[in-house]
Image (cartoon, rainbow, N blue to C red):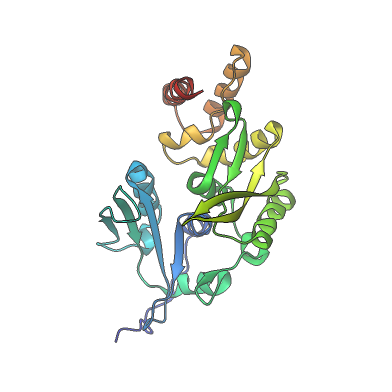
């Protein structure tokens, strides 16, 4: 049985750690499997987010291997195939696992949230954040996998560390014929949402994720001001930002 006990400890780079911390709040997880002493990182994204998964894999190449990227076929839970990244089992990941997990279950604690960076926030938003409401000028983190107390810790973290005011409120939905309640983080003020987006815009990784930062306005001047901010703060060219804005505007016009 391979327990990985002899693997040499190599600390994570700051950038890799930031991506990992954001990912475990979203579509990633650290696990120690039976028979192994060290943790590995697993991330899954849908076919439409293939480019995003590949960006993560590139950022995490220091913990990846030759076969870290794979494709999962569609199954009974999903009609579309999934792209998957699985890291090596490493002591540095075990260290993070011990900090953030208990019994292989993620625990939301300020002890490790305080180690997150603006890049971590951007990854979390790209994983689980969405613009909602008229014109997409309100935001929500889909924290459905966490209990109310954990979501409240996350909302408090956003306020204390990043000065972004958000509220915790439930959403109900039926699952297997039963009504269930989930807790989400809502940014219902446009000013607070802009404050948050200004923090993460320099770290948005790929053009397709710009749609999660582009606010839509009927007023032409308001629209141009926000597009100018996105261009100024992000790492993308004018043409790329405008192209993503036009895609989003066209989609919104179809469904409004």
Quarter of the image with the N terminus in it: bottom left
Q: Quadrant of residue 99?
A: bottom right
Left or right: residue 113 compared with residue 161: left
Q: Is residue 114 visible?
A: no
Picture residue at 65% right of the left edge, 33% below the top: 194
Q: Is residue 38 above or below residue 226?
A: below
* Viewer-proximal residue among 250 and 178: 178
Q: Residue furthest bottom?
A: 1
Q: Residue furthest top?
A: 220
Picture residue at 39% right of the left edge, 78% below the top: 8
Left or right: residue 11 compared with residue 54: right
Query: Tag count in the figure?
Result: 0
Residue 47: x and y in percent read 32, 45
* Viewer-proximal residue among 41 and 253: 253
Picture residue at 60% right of the left edge, 43% below the top: 140
* Viewer-proximal residue among 103 and 173: 173
Q: Is residue 255 visible?
A: yes
Picture residue at 34% right of the left edge, 51% below the top: 78
Residue 7: x and y in percent read 37, 79
Q: Quadrant of residue 64?
A: bottom left
Residue 187: x and y in percent read 66, 40
Residue 38: x and y in percent read 42, 77
């Amino acid at each position: 049985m391979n327990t990985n006990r002899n693997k040499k400890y190599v600390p994570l780079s700051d950038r890799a750690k930031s991506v990992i911390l954001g990912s475990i709040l979203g579509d990633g997880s650290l696990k120690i499997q039976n028979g192994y002493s060290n943790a590995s990182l697993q991330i899954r994204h849908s076919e439409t987010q293939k480019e995003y998964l590949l960006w993560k894999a590139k950022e995490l190449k220091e913990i990846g291997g030759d076969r870290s990227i794979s494709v999962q076929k569609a199954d009974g839970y999903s009609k579309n195939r999934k792209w998957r990244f699985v890291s090596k089992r490493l002591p540095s990941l075990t260290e993070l696992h011990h900090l953030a997990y208990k019994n292989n279950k993620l625990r939301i604690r300020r002890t490790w949230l305080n180690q997150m960076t603006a890049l971590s926030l951007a990854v979390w938003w790209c994983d689980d954040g969405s613009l909602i409401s008229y014109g997409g000028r309100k935001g929500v983190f889909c924290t459905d996998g966490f209990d109310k107390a954990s979501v409240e810790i996350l909302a408090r973290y956003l306020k204390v560390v990043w000065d972004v005011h958000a509220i915790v409120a439930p959403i109900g939905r039926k699952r297997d014929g039963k009504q269930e309640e989930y807790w989400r983080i809502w940014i219902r003020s446009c000013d607070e949402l802009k404050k948050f987006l200004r923090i993460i815009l320099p770290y948005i990784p790929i053009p397709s994720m710009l749609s999660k930062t582009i606010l839509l306005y009927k007023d032409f001047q308001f629209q141009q001001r926000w597009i100018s901010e996105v261009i100024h703060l992000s790492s993308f060219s004018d043409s790329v930002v405008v192209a993503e804005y036009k895609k989003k505007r066209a989609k919104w016009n179809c469904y409004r």
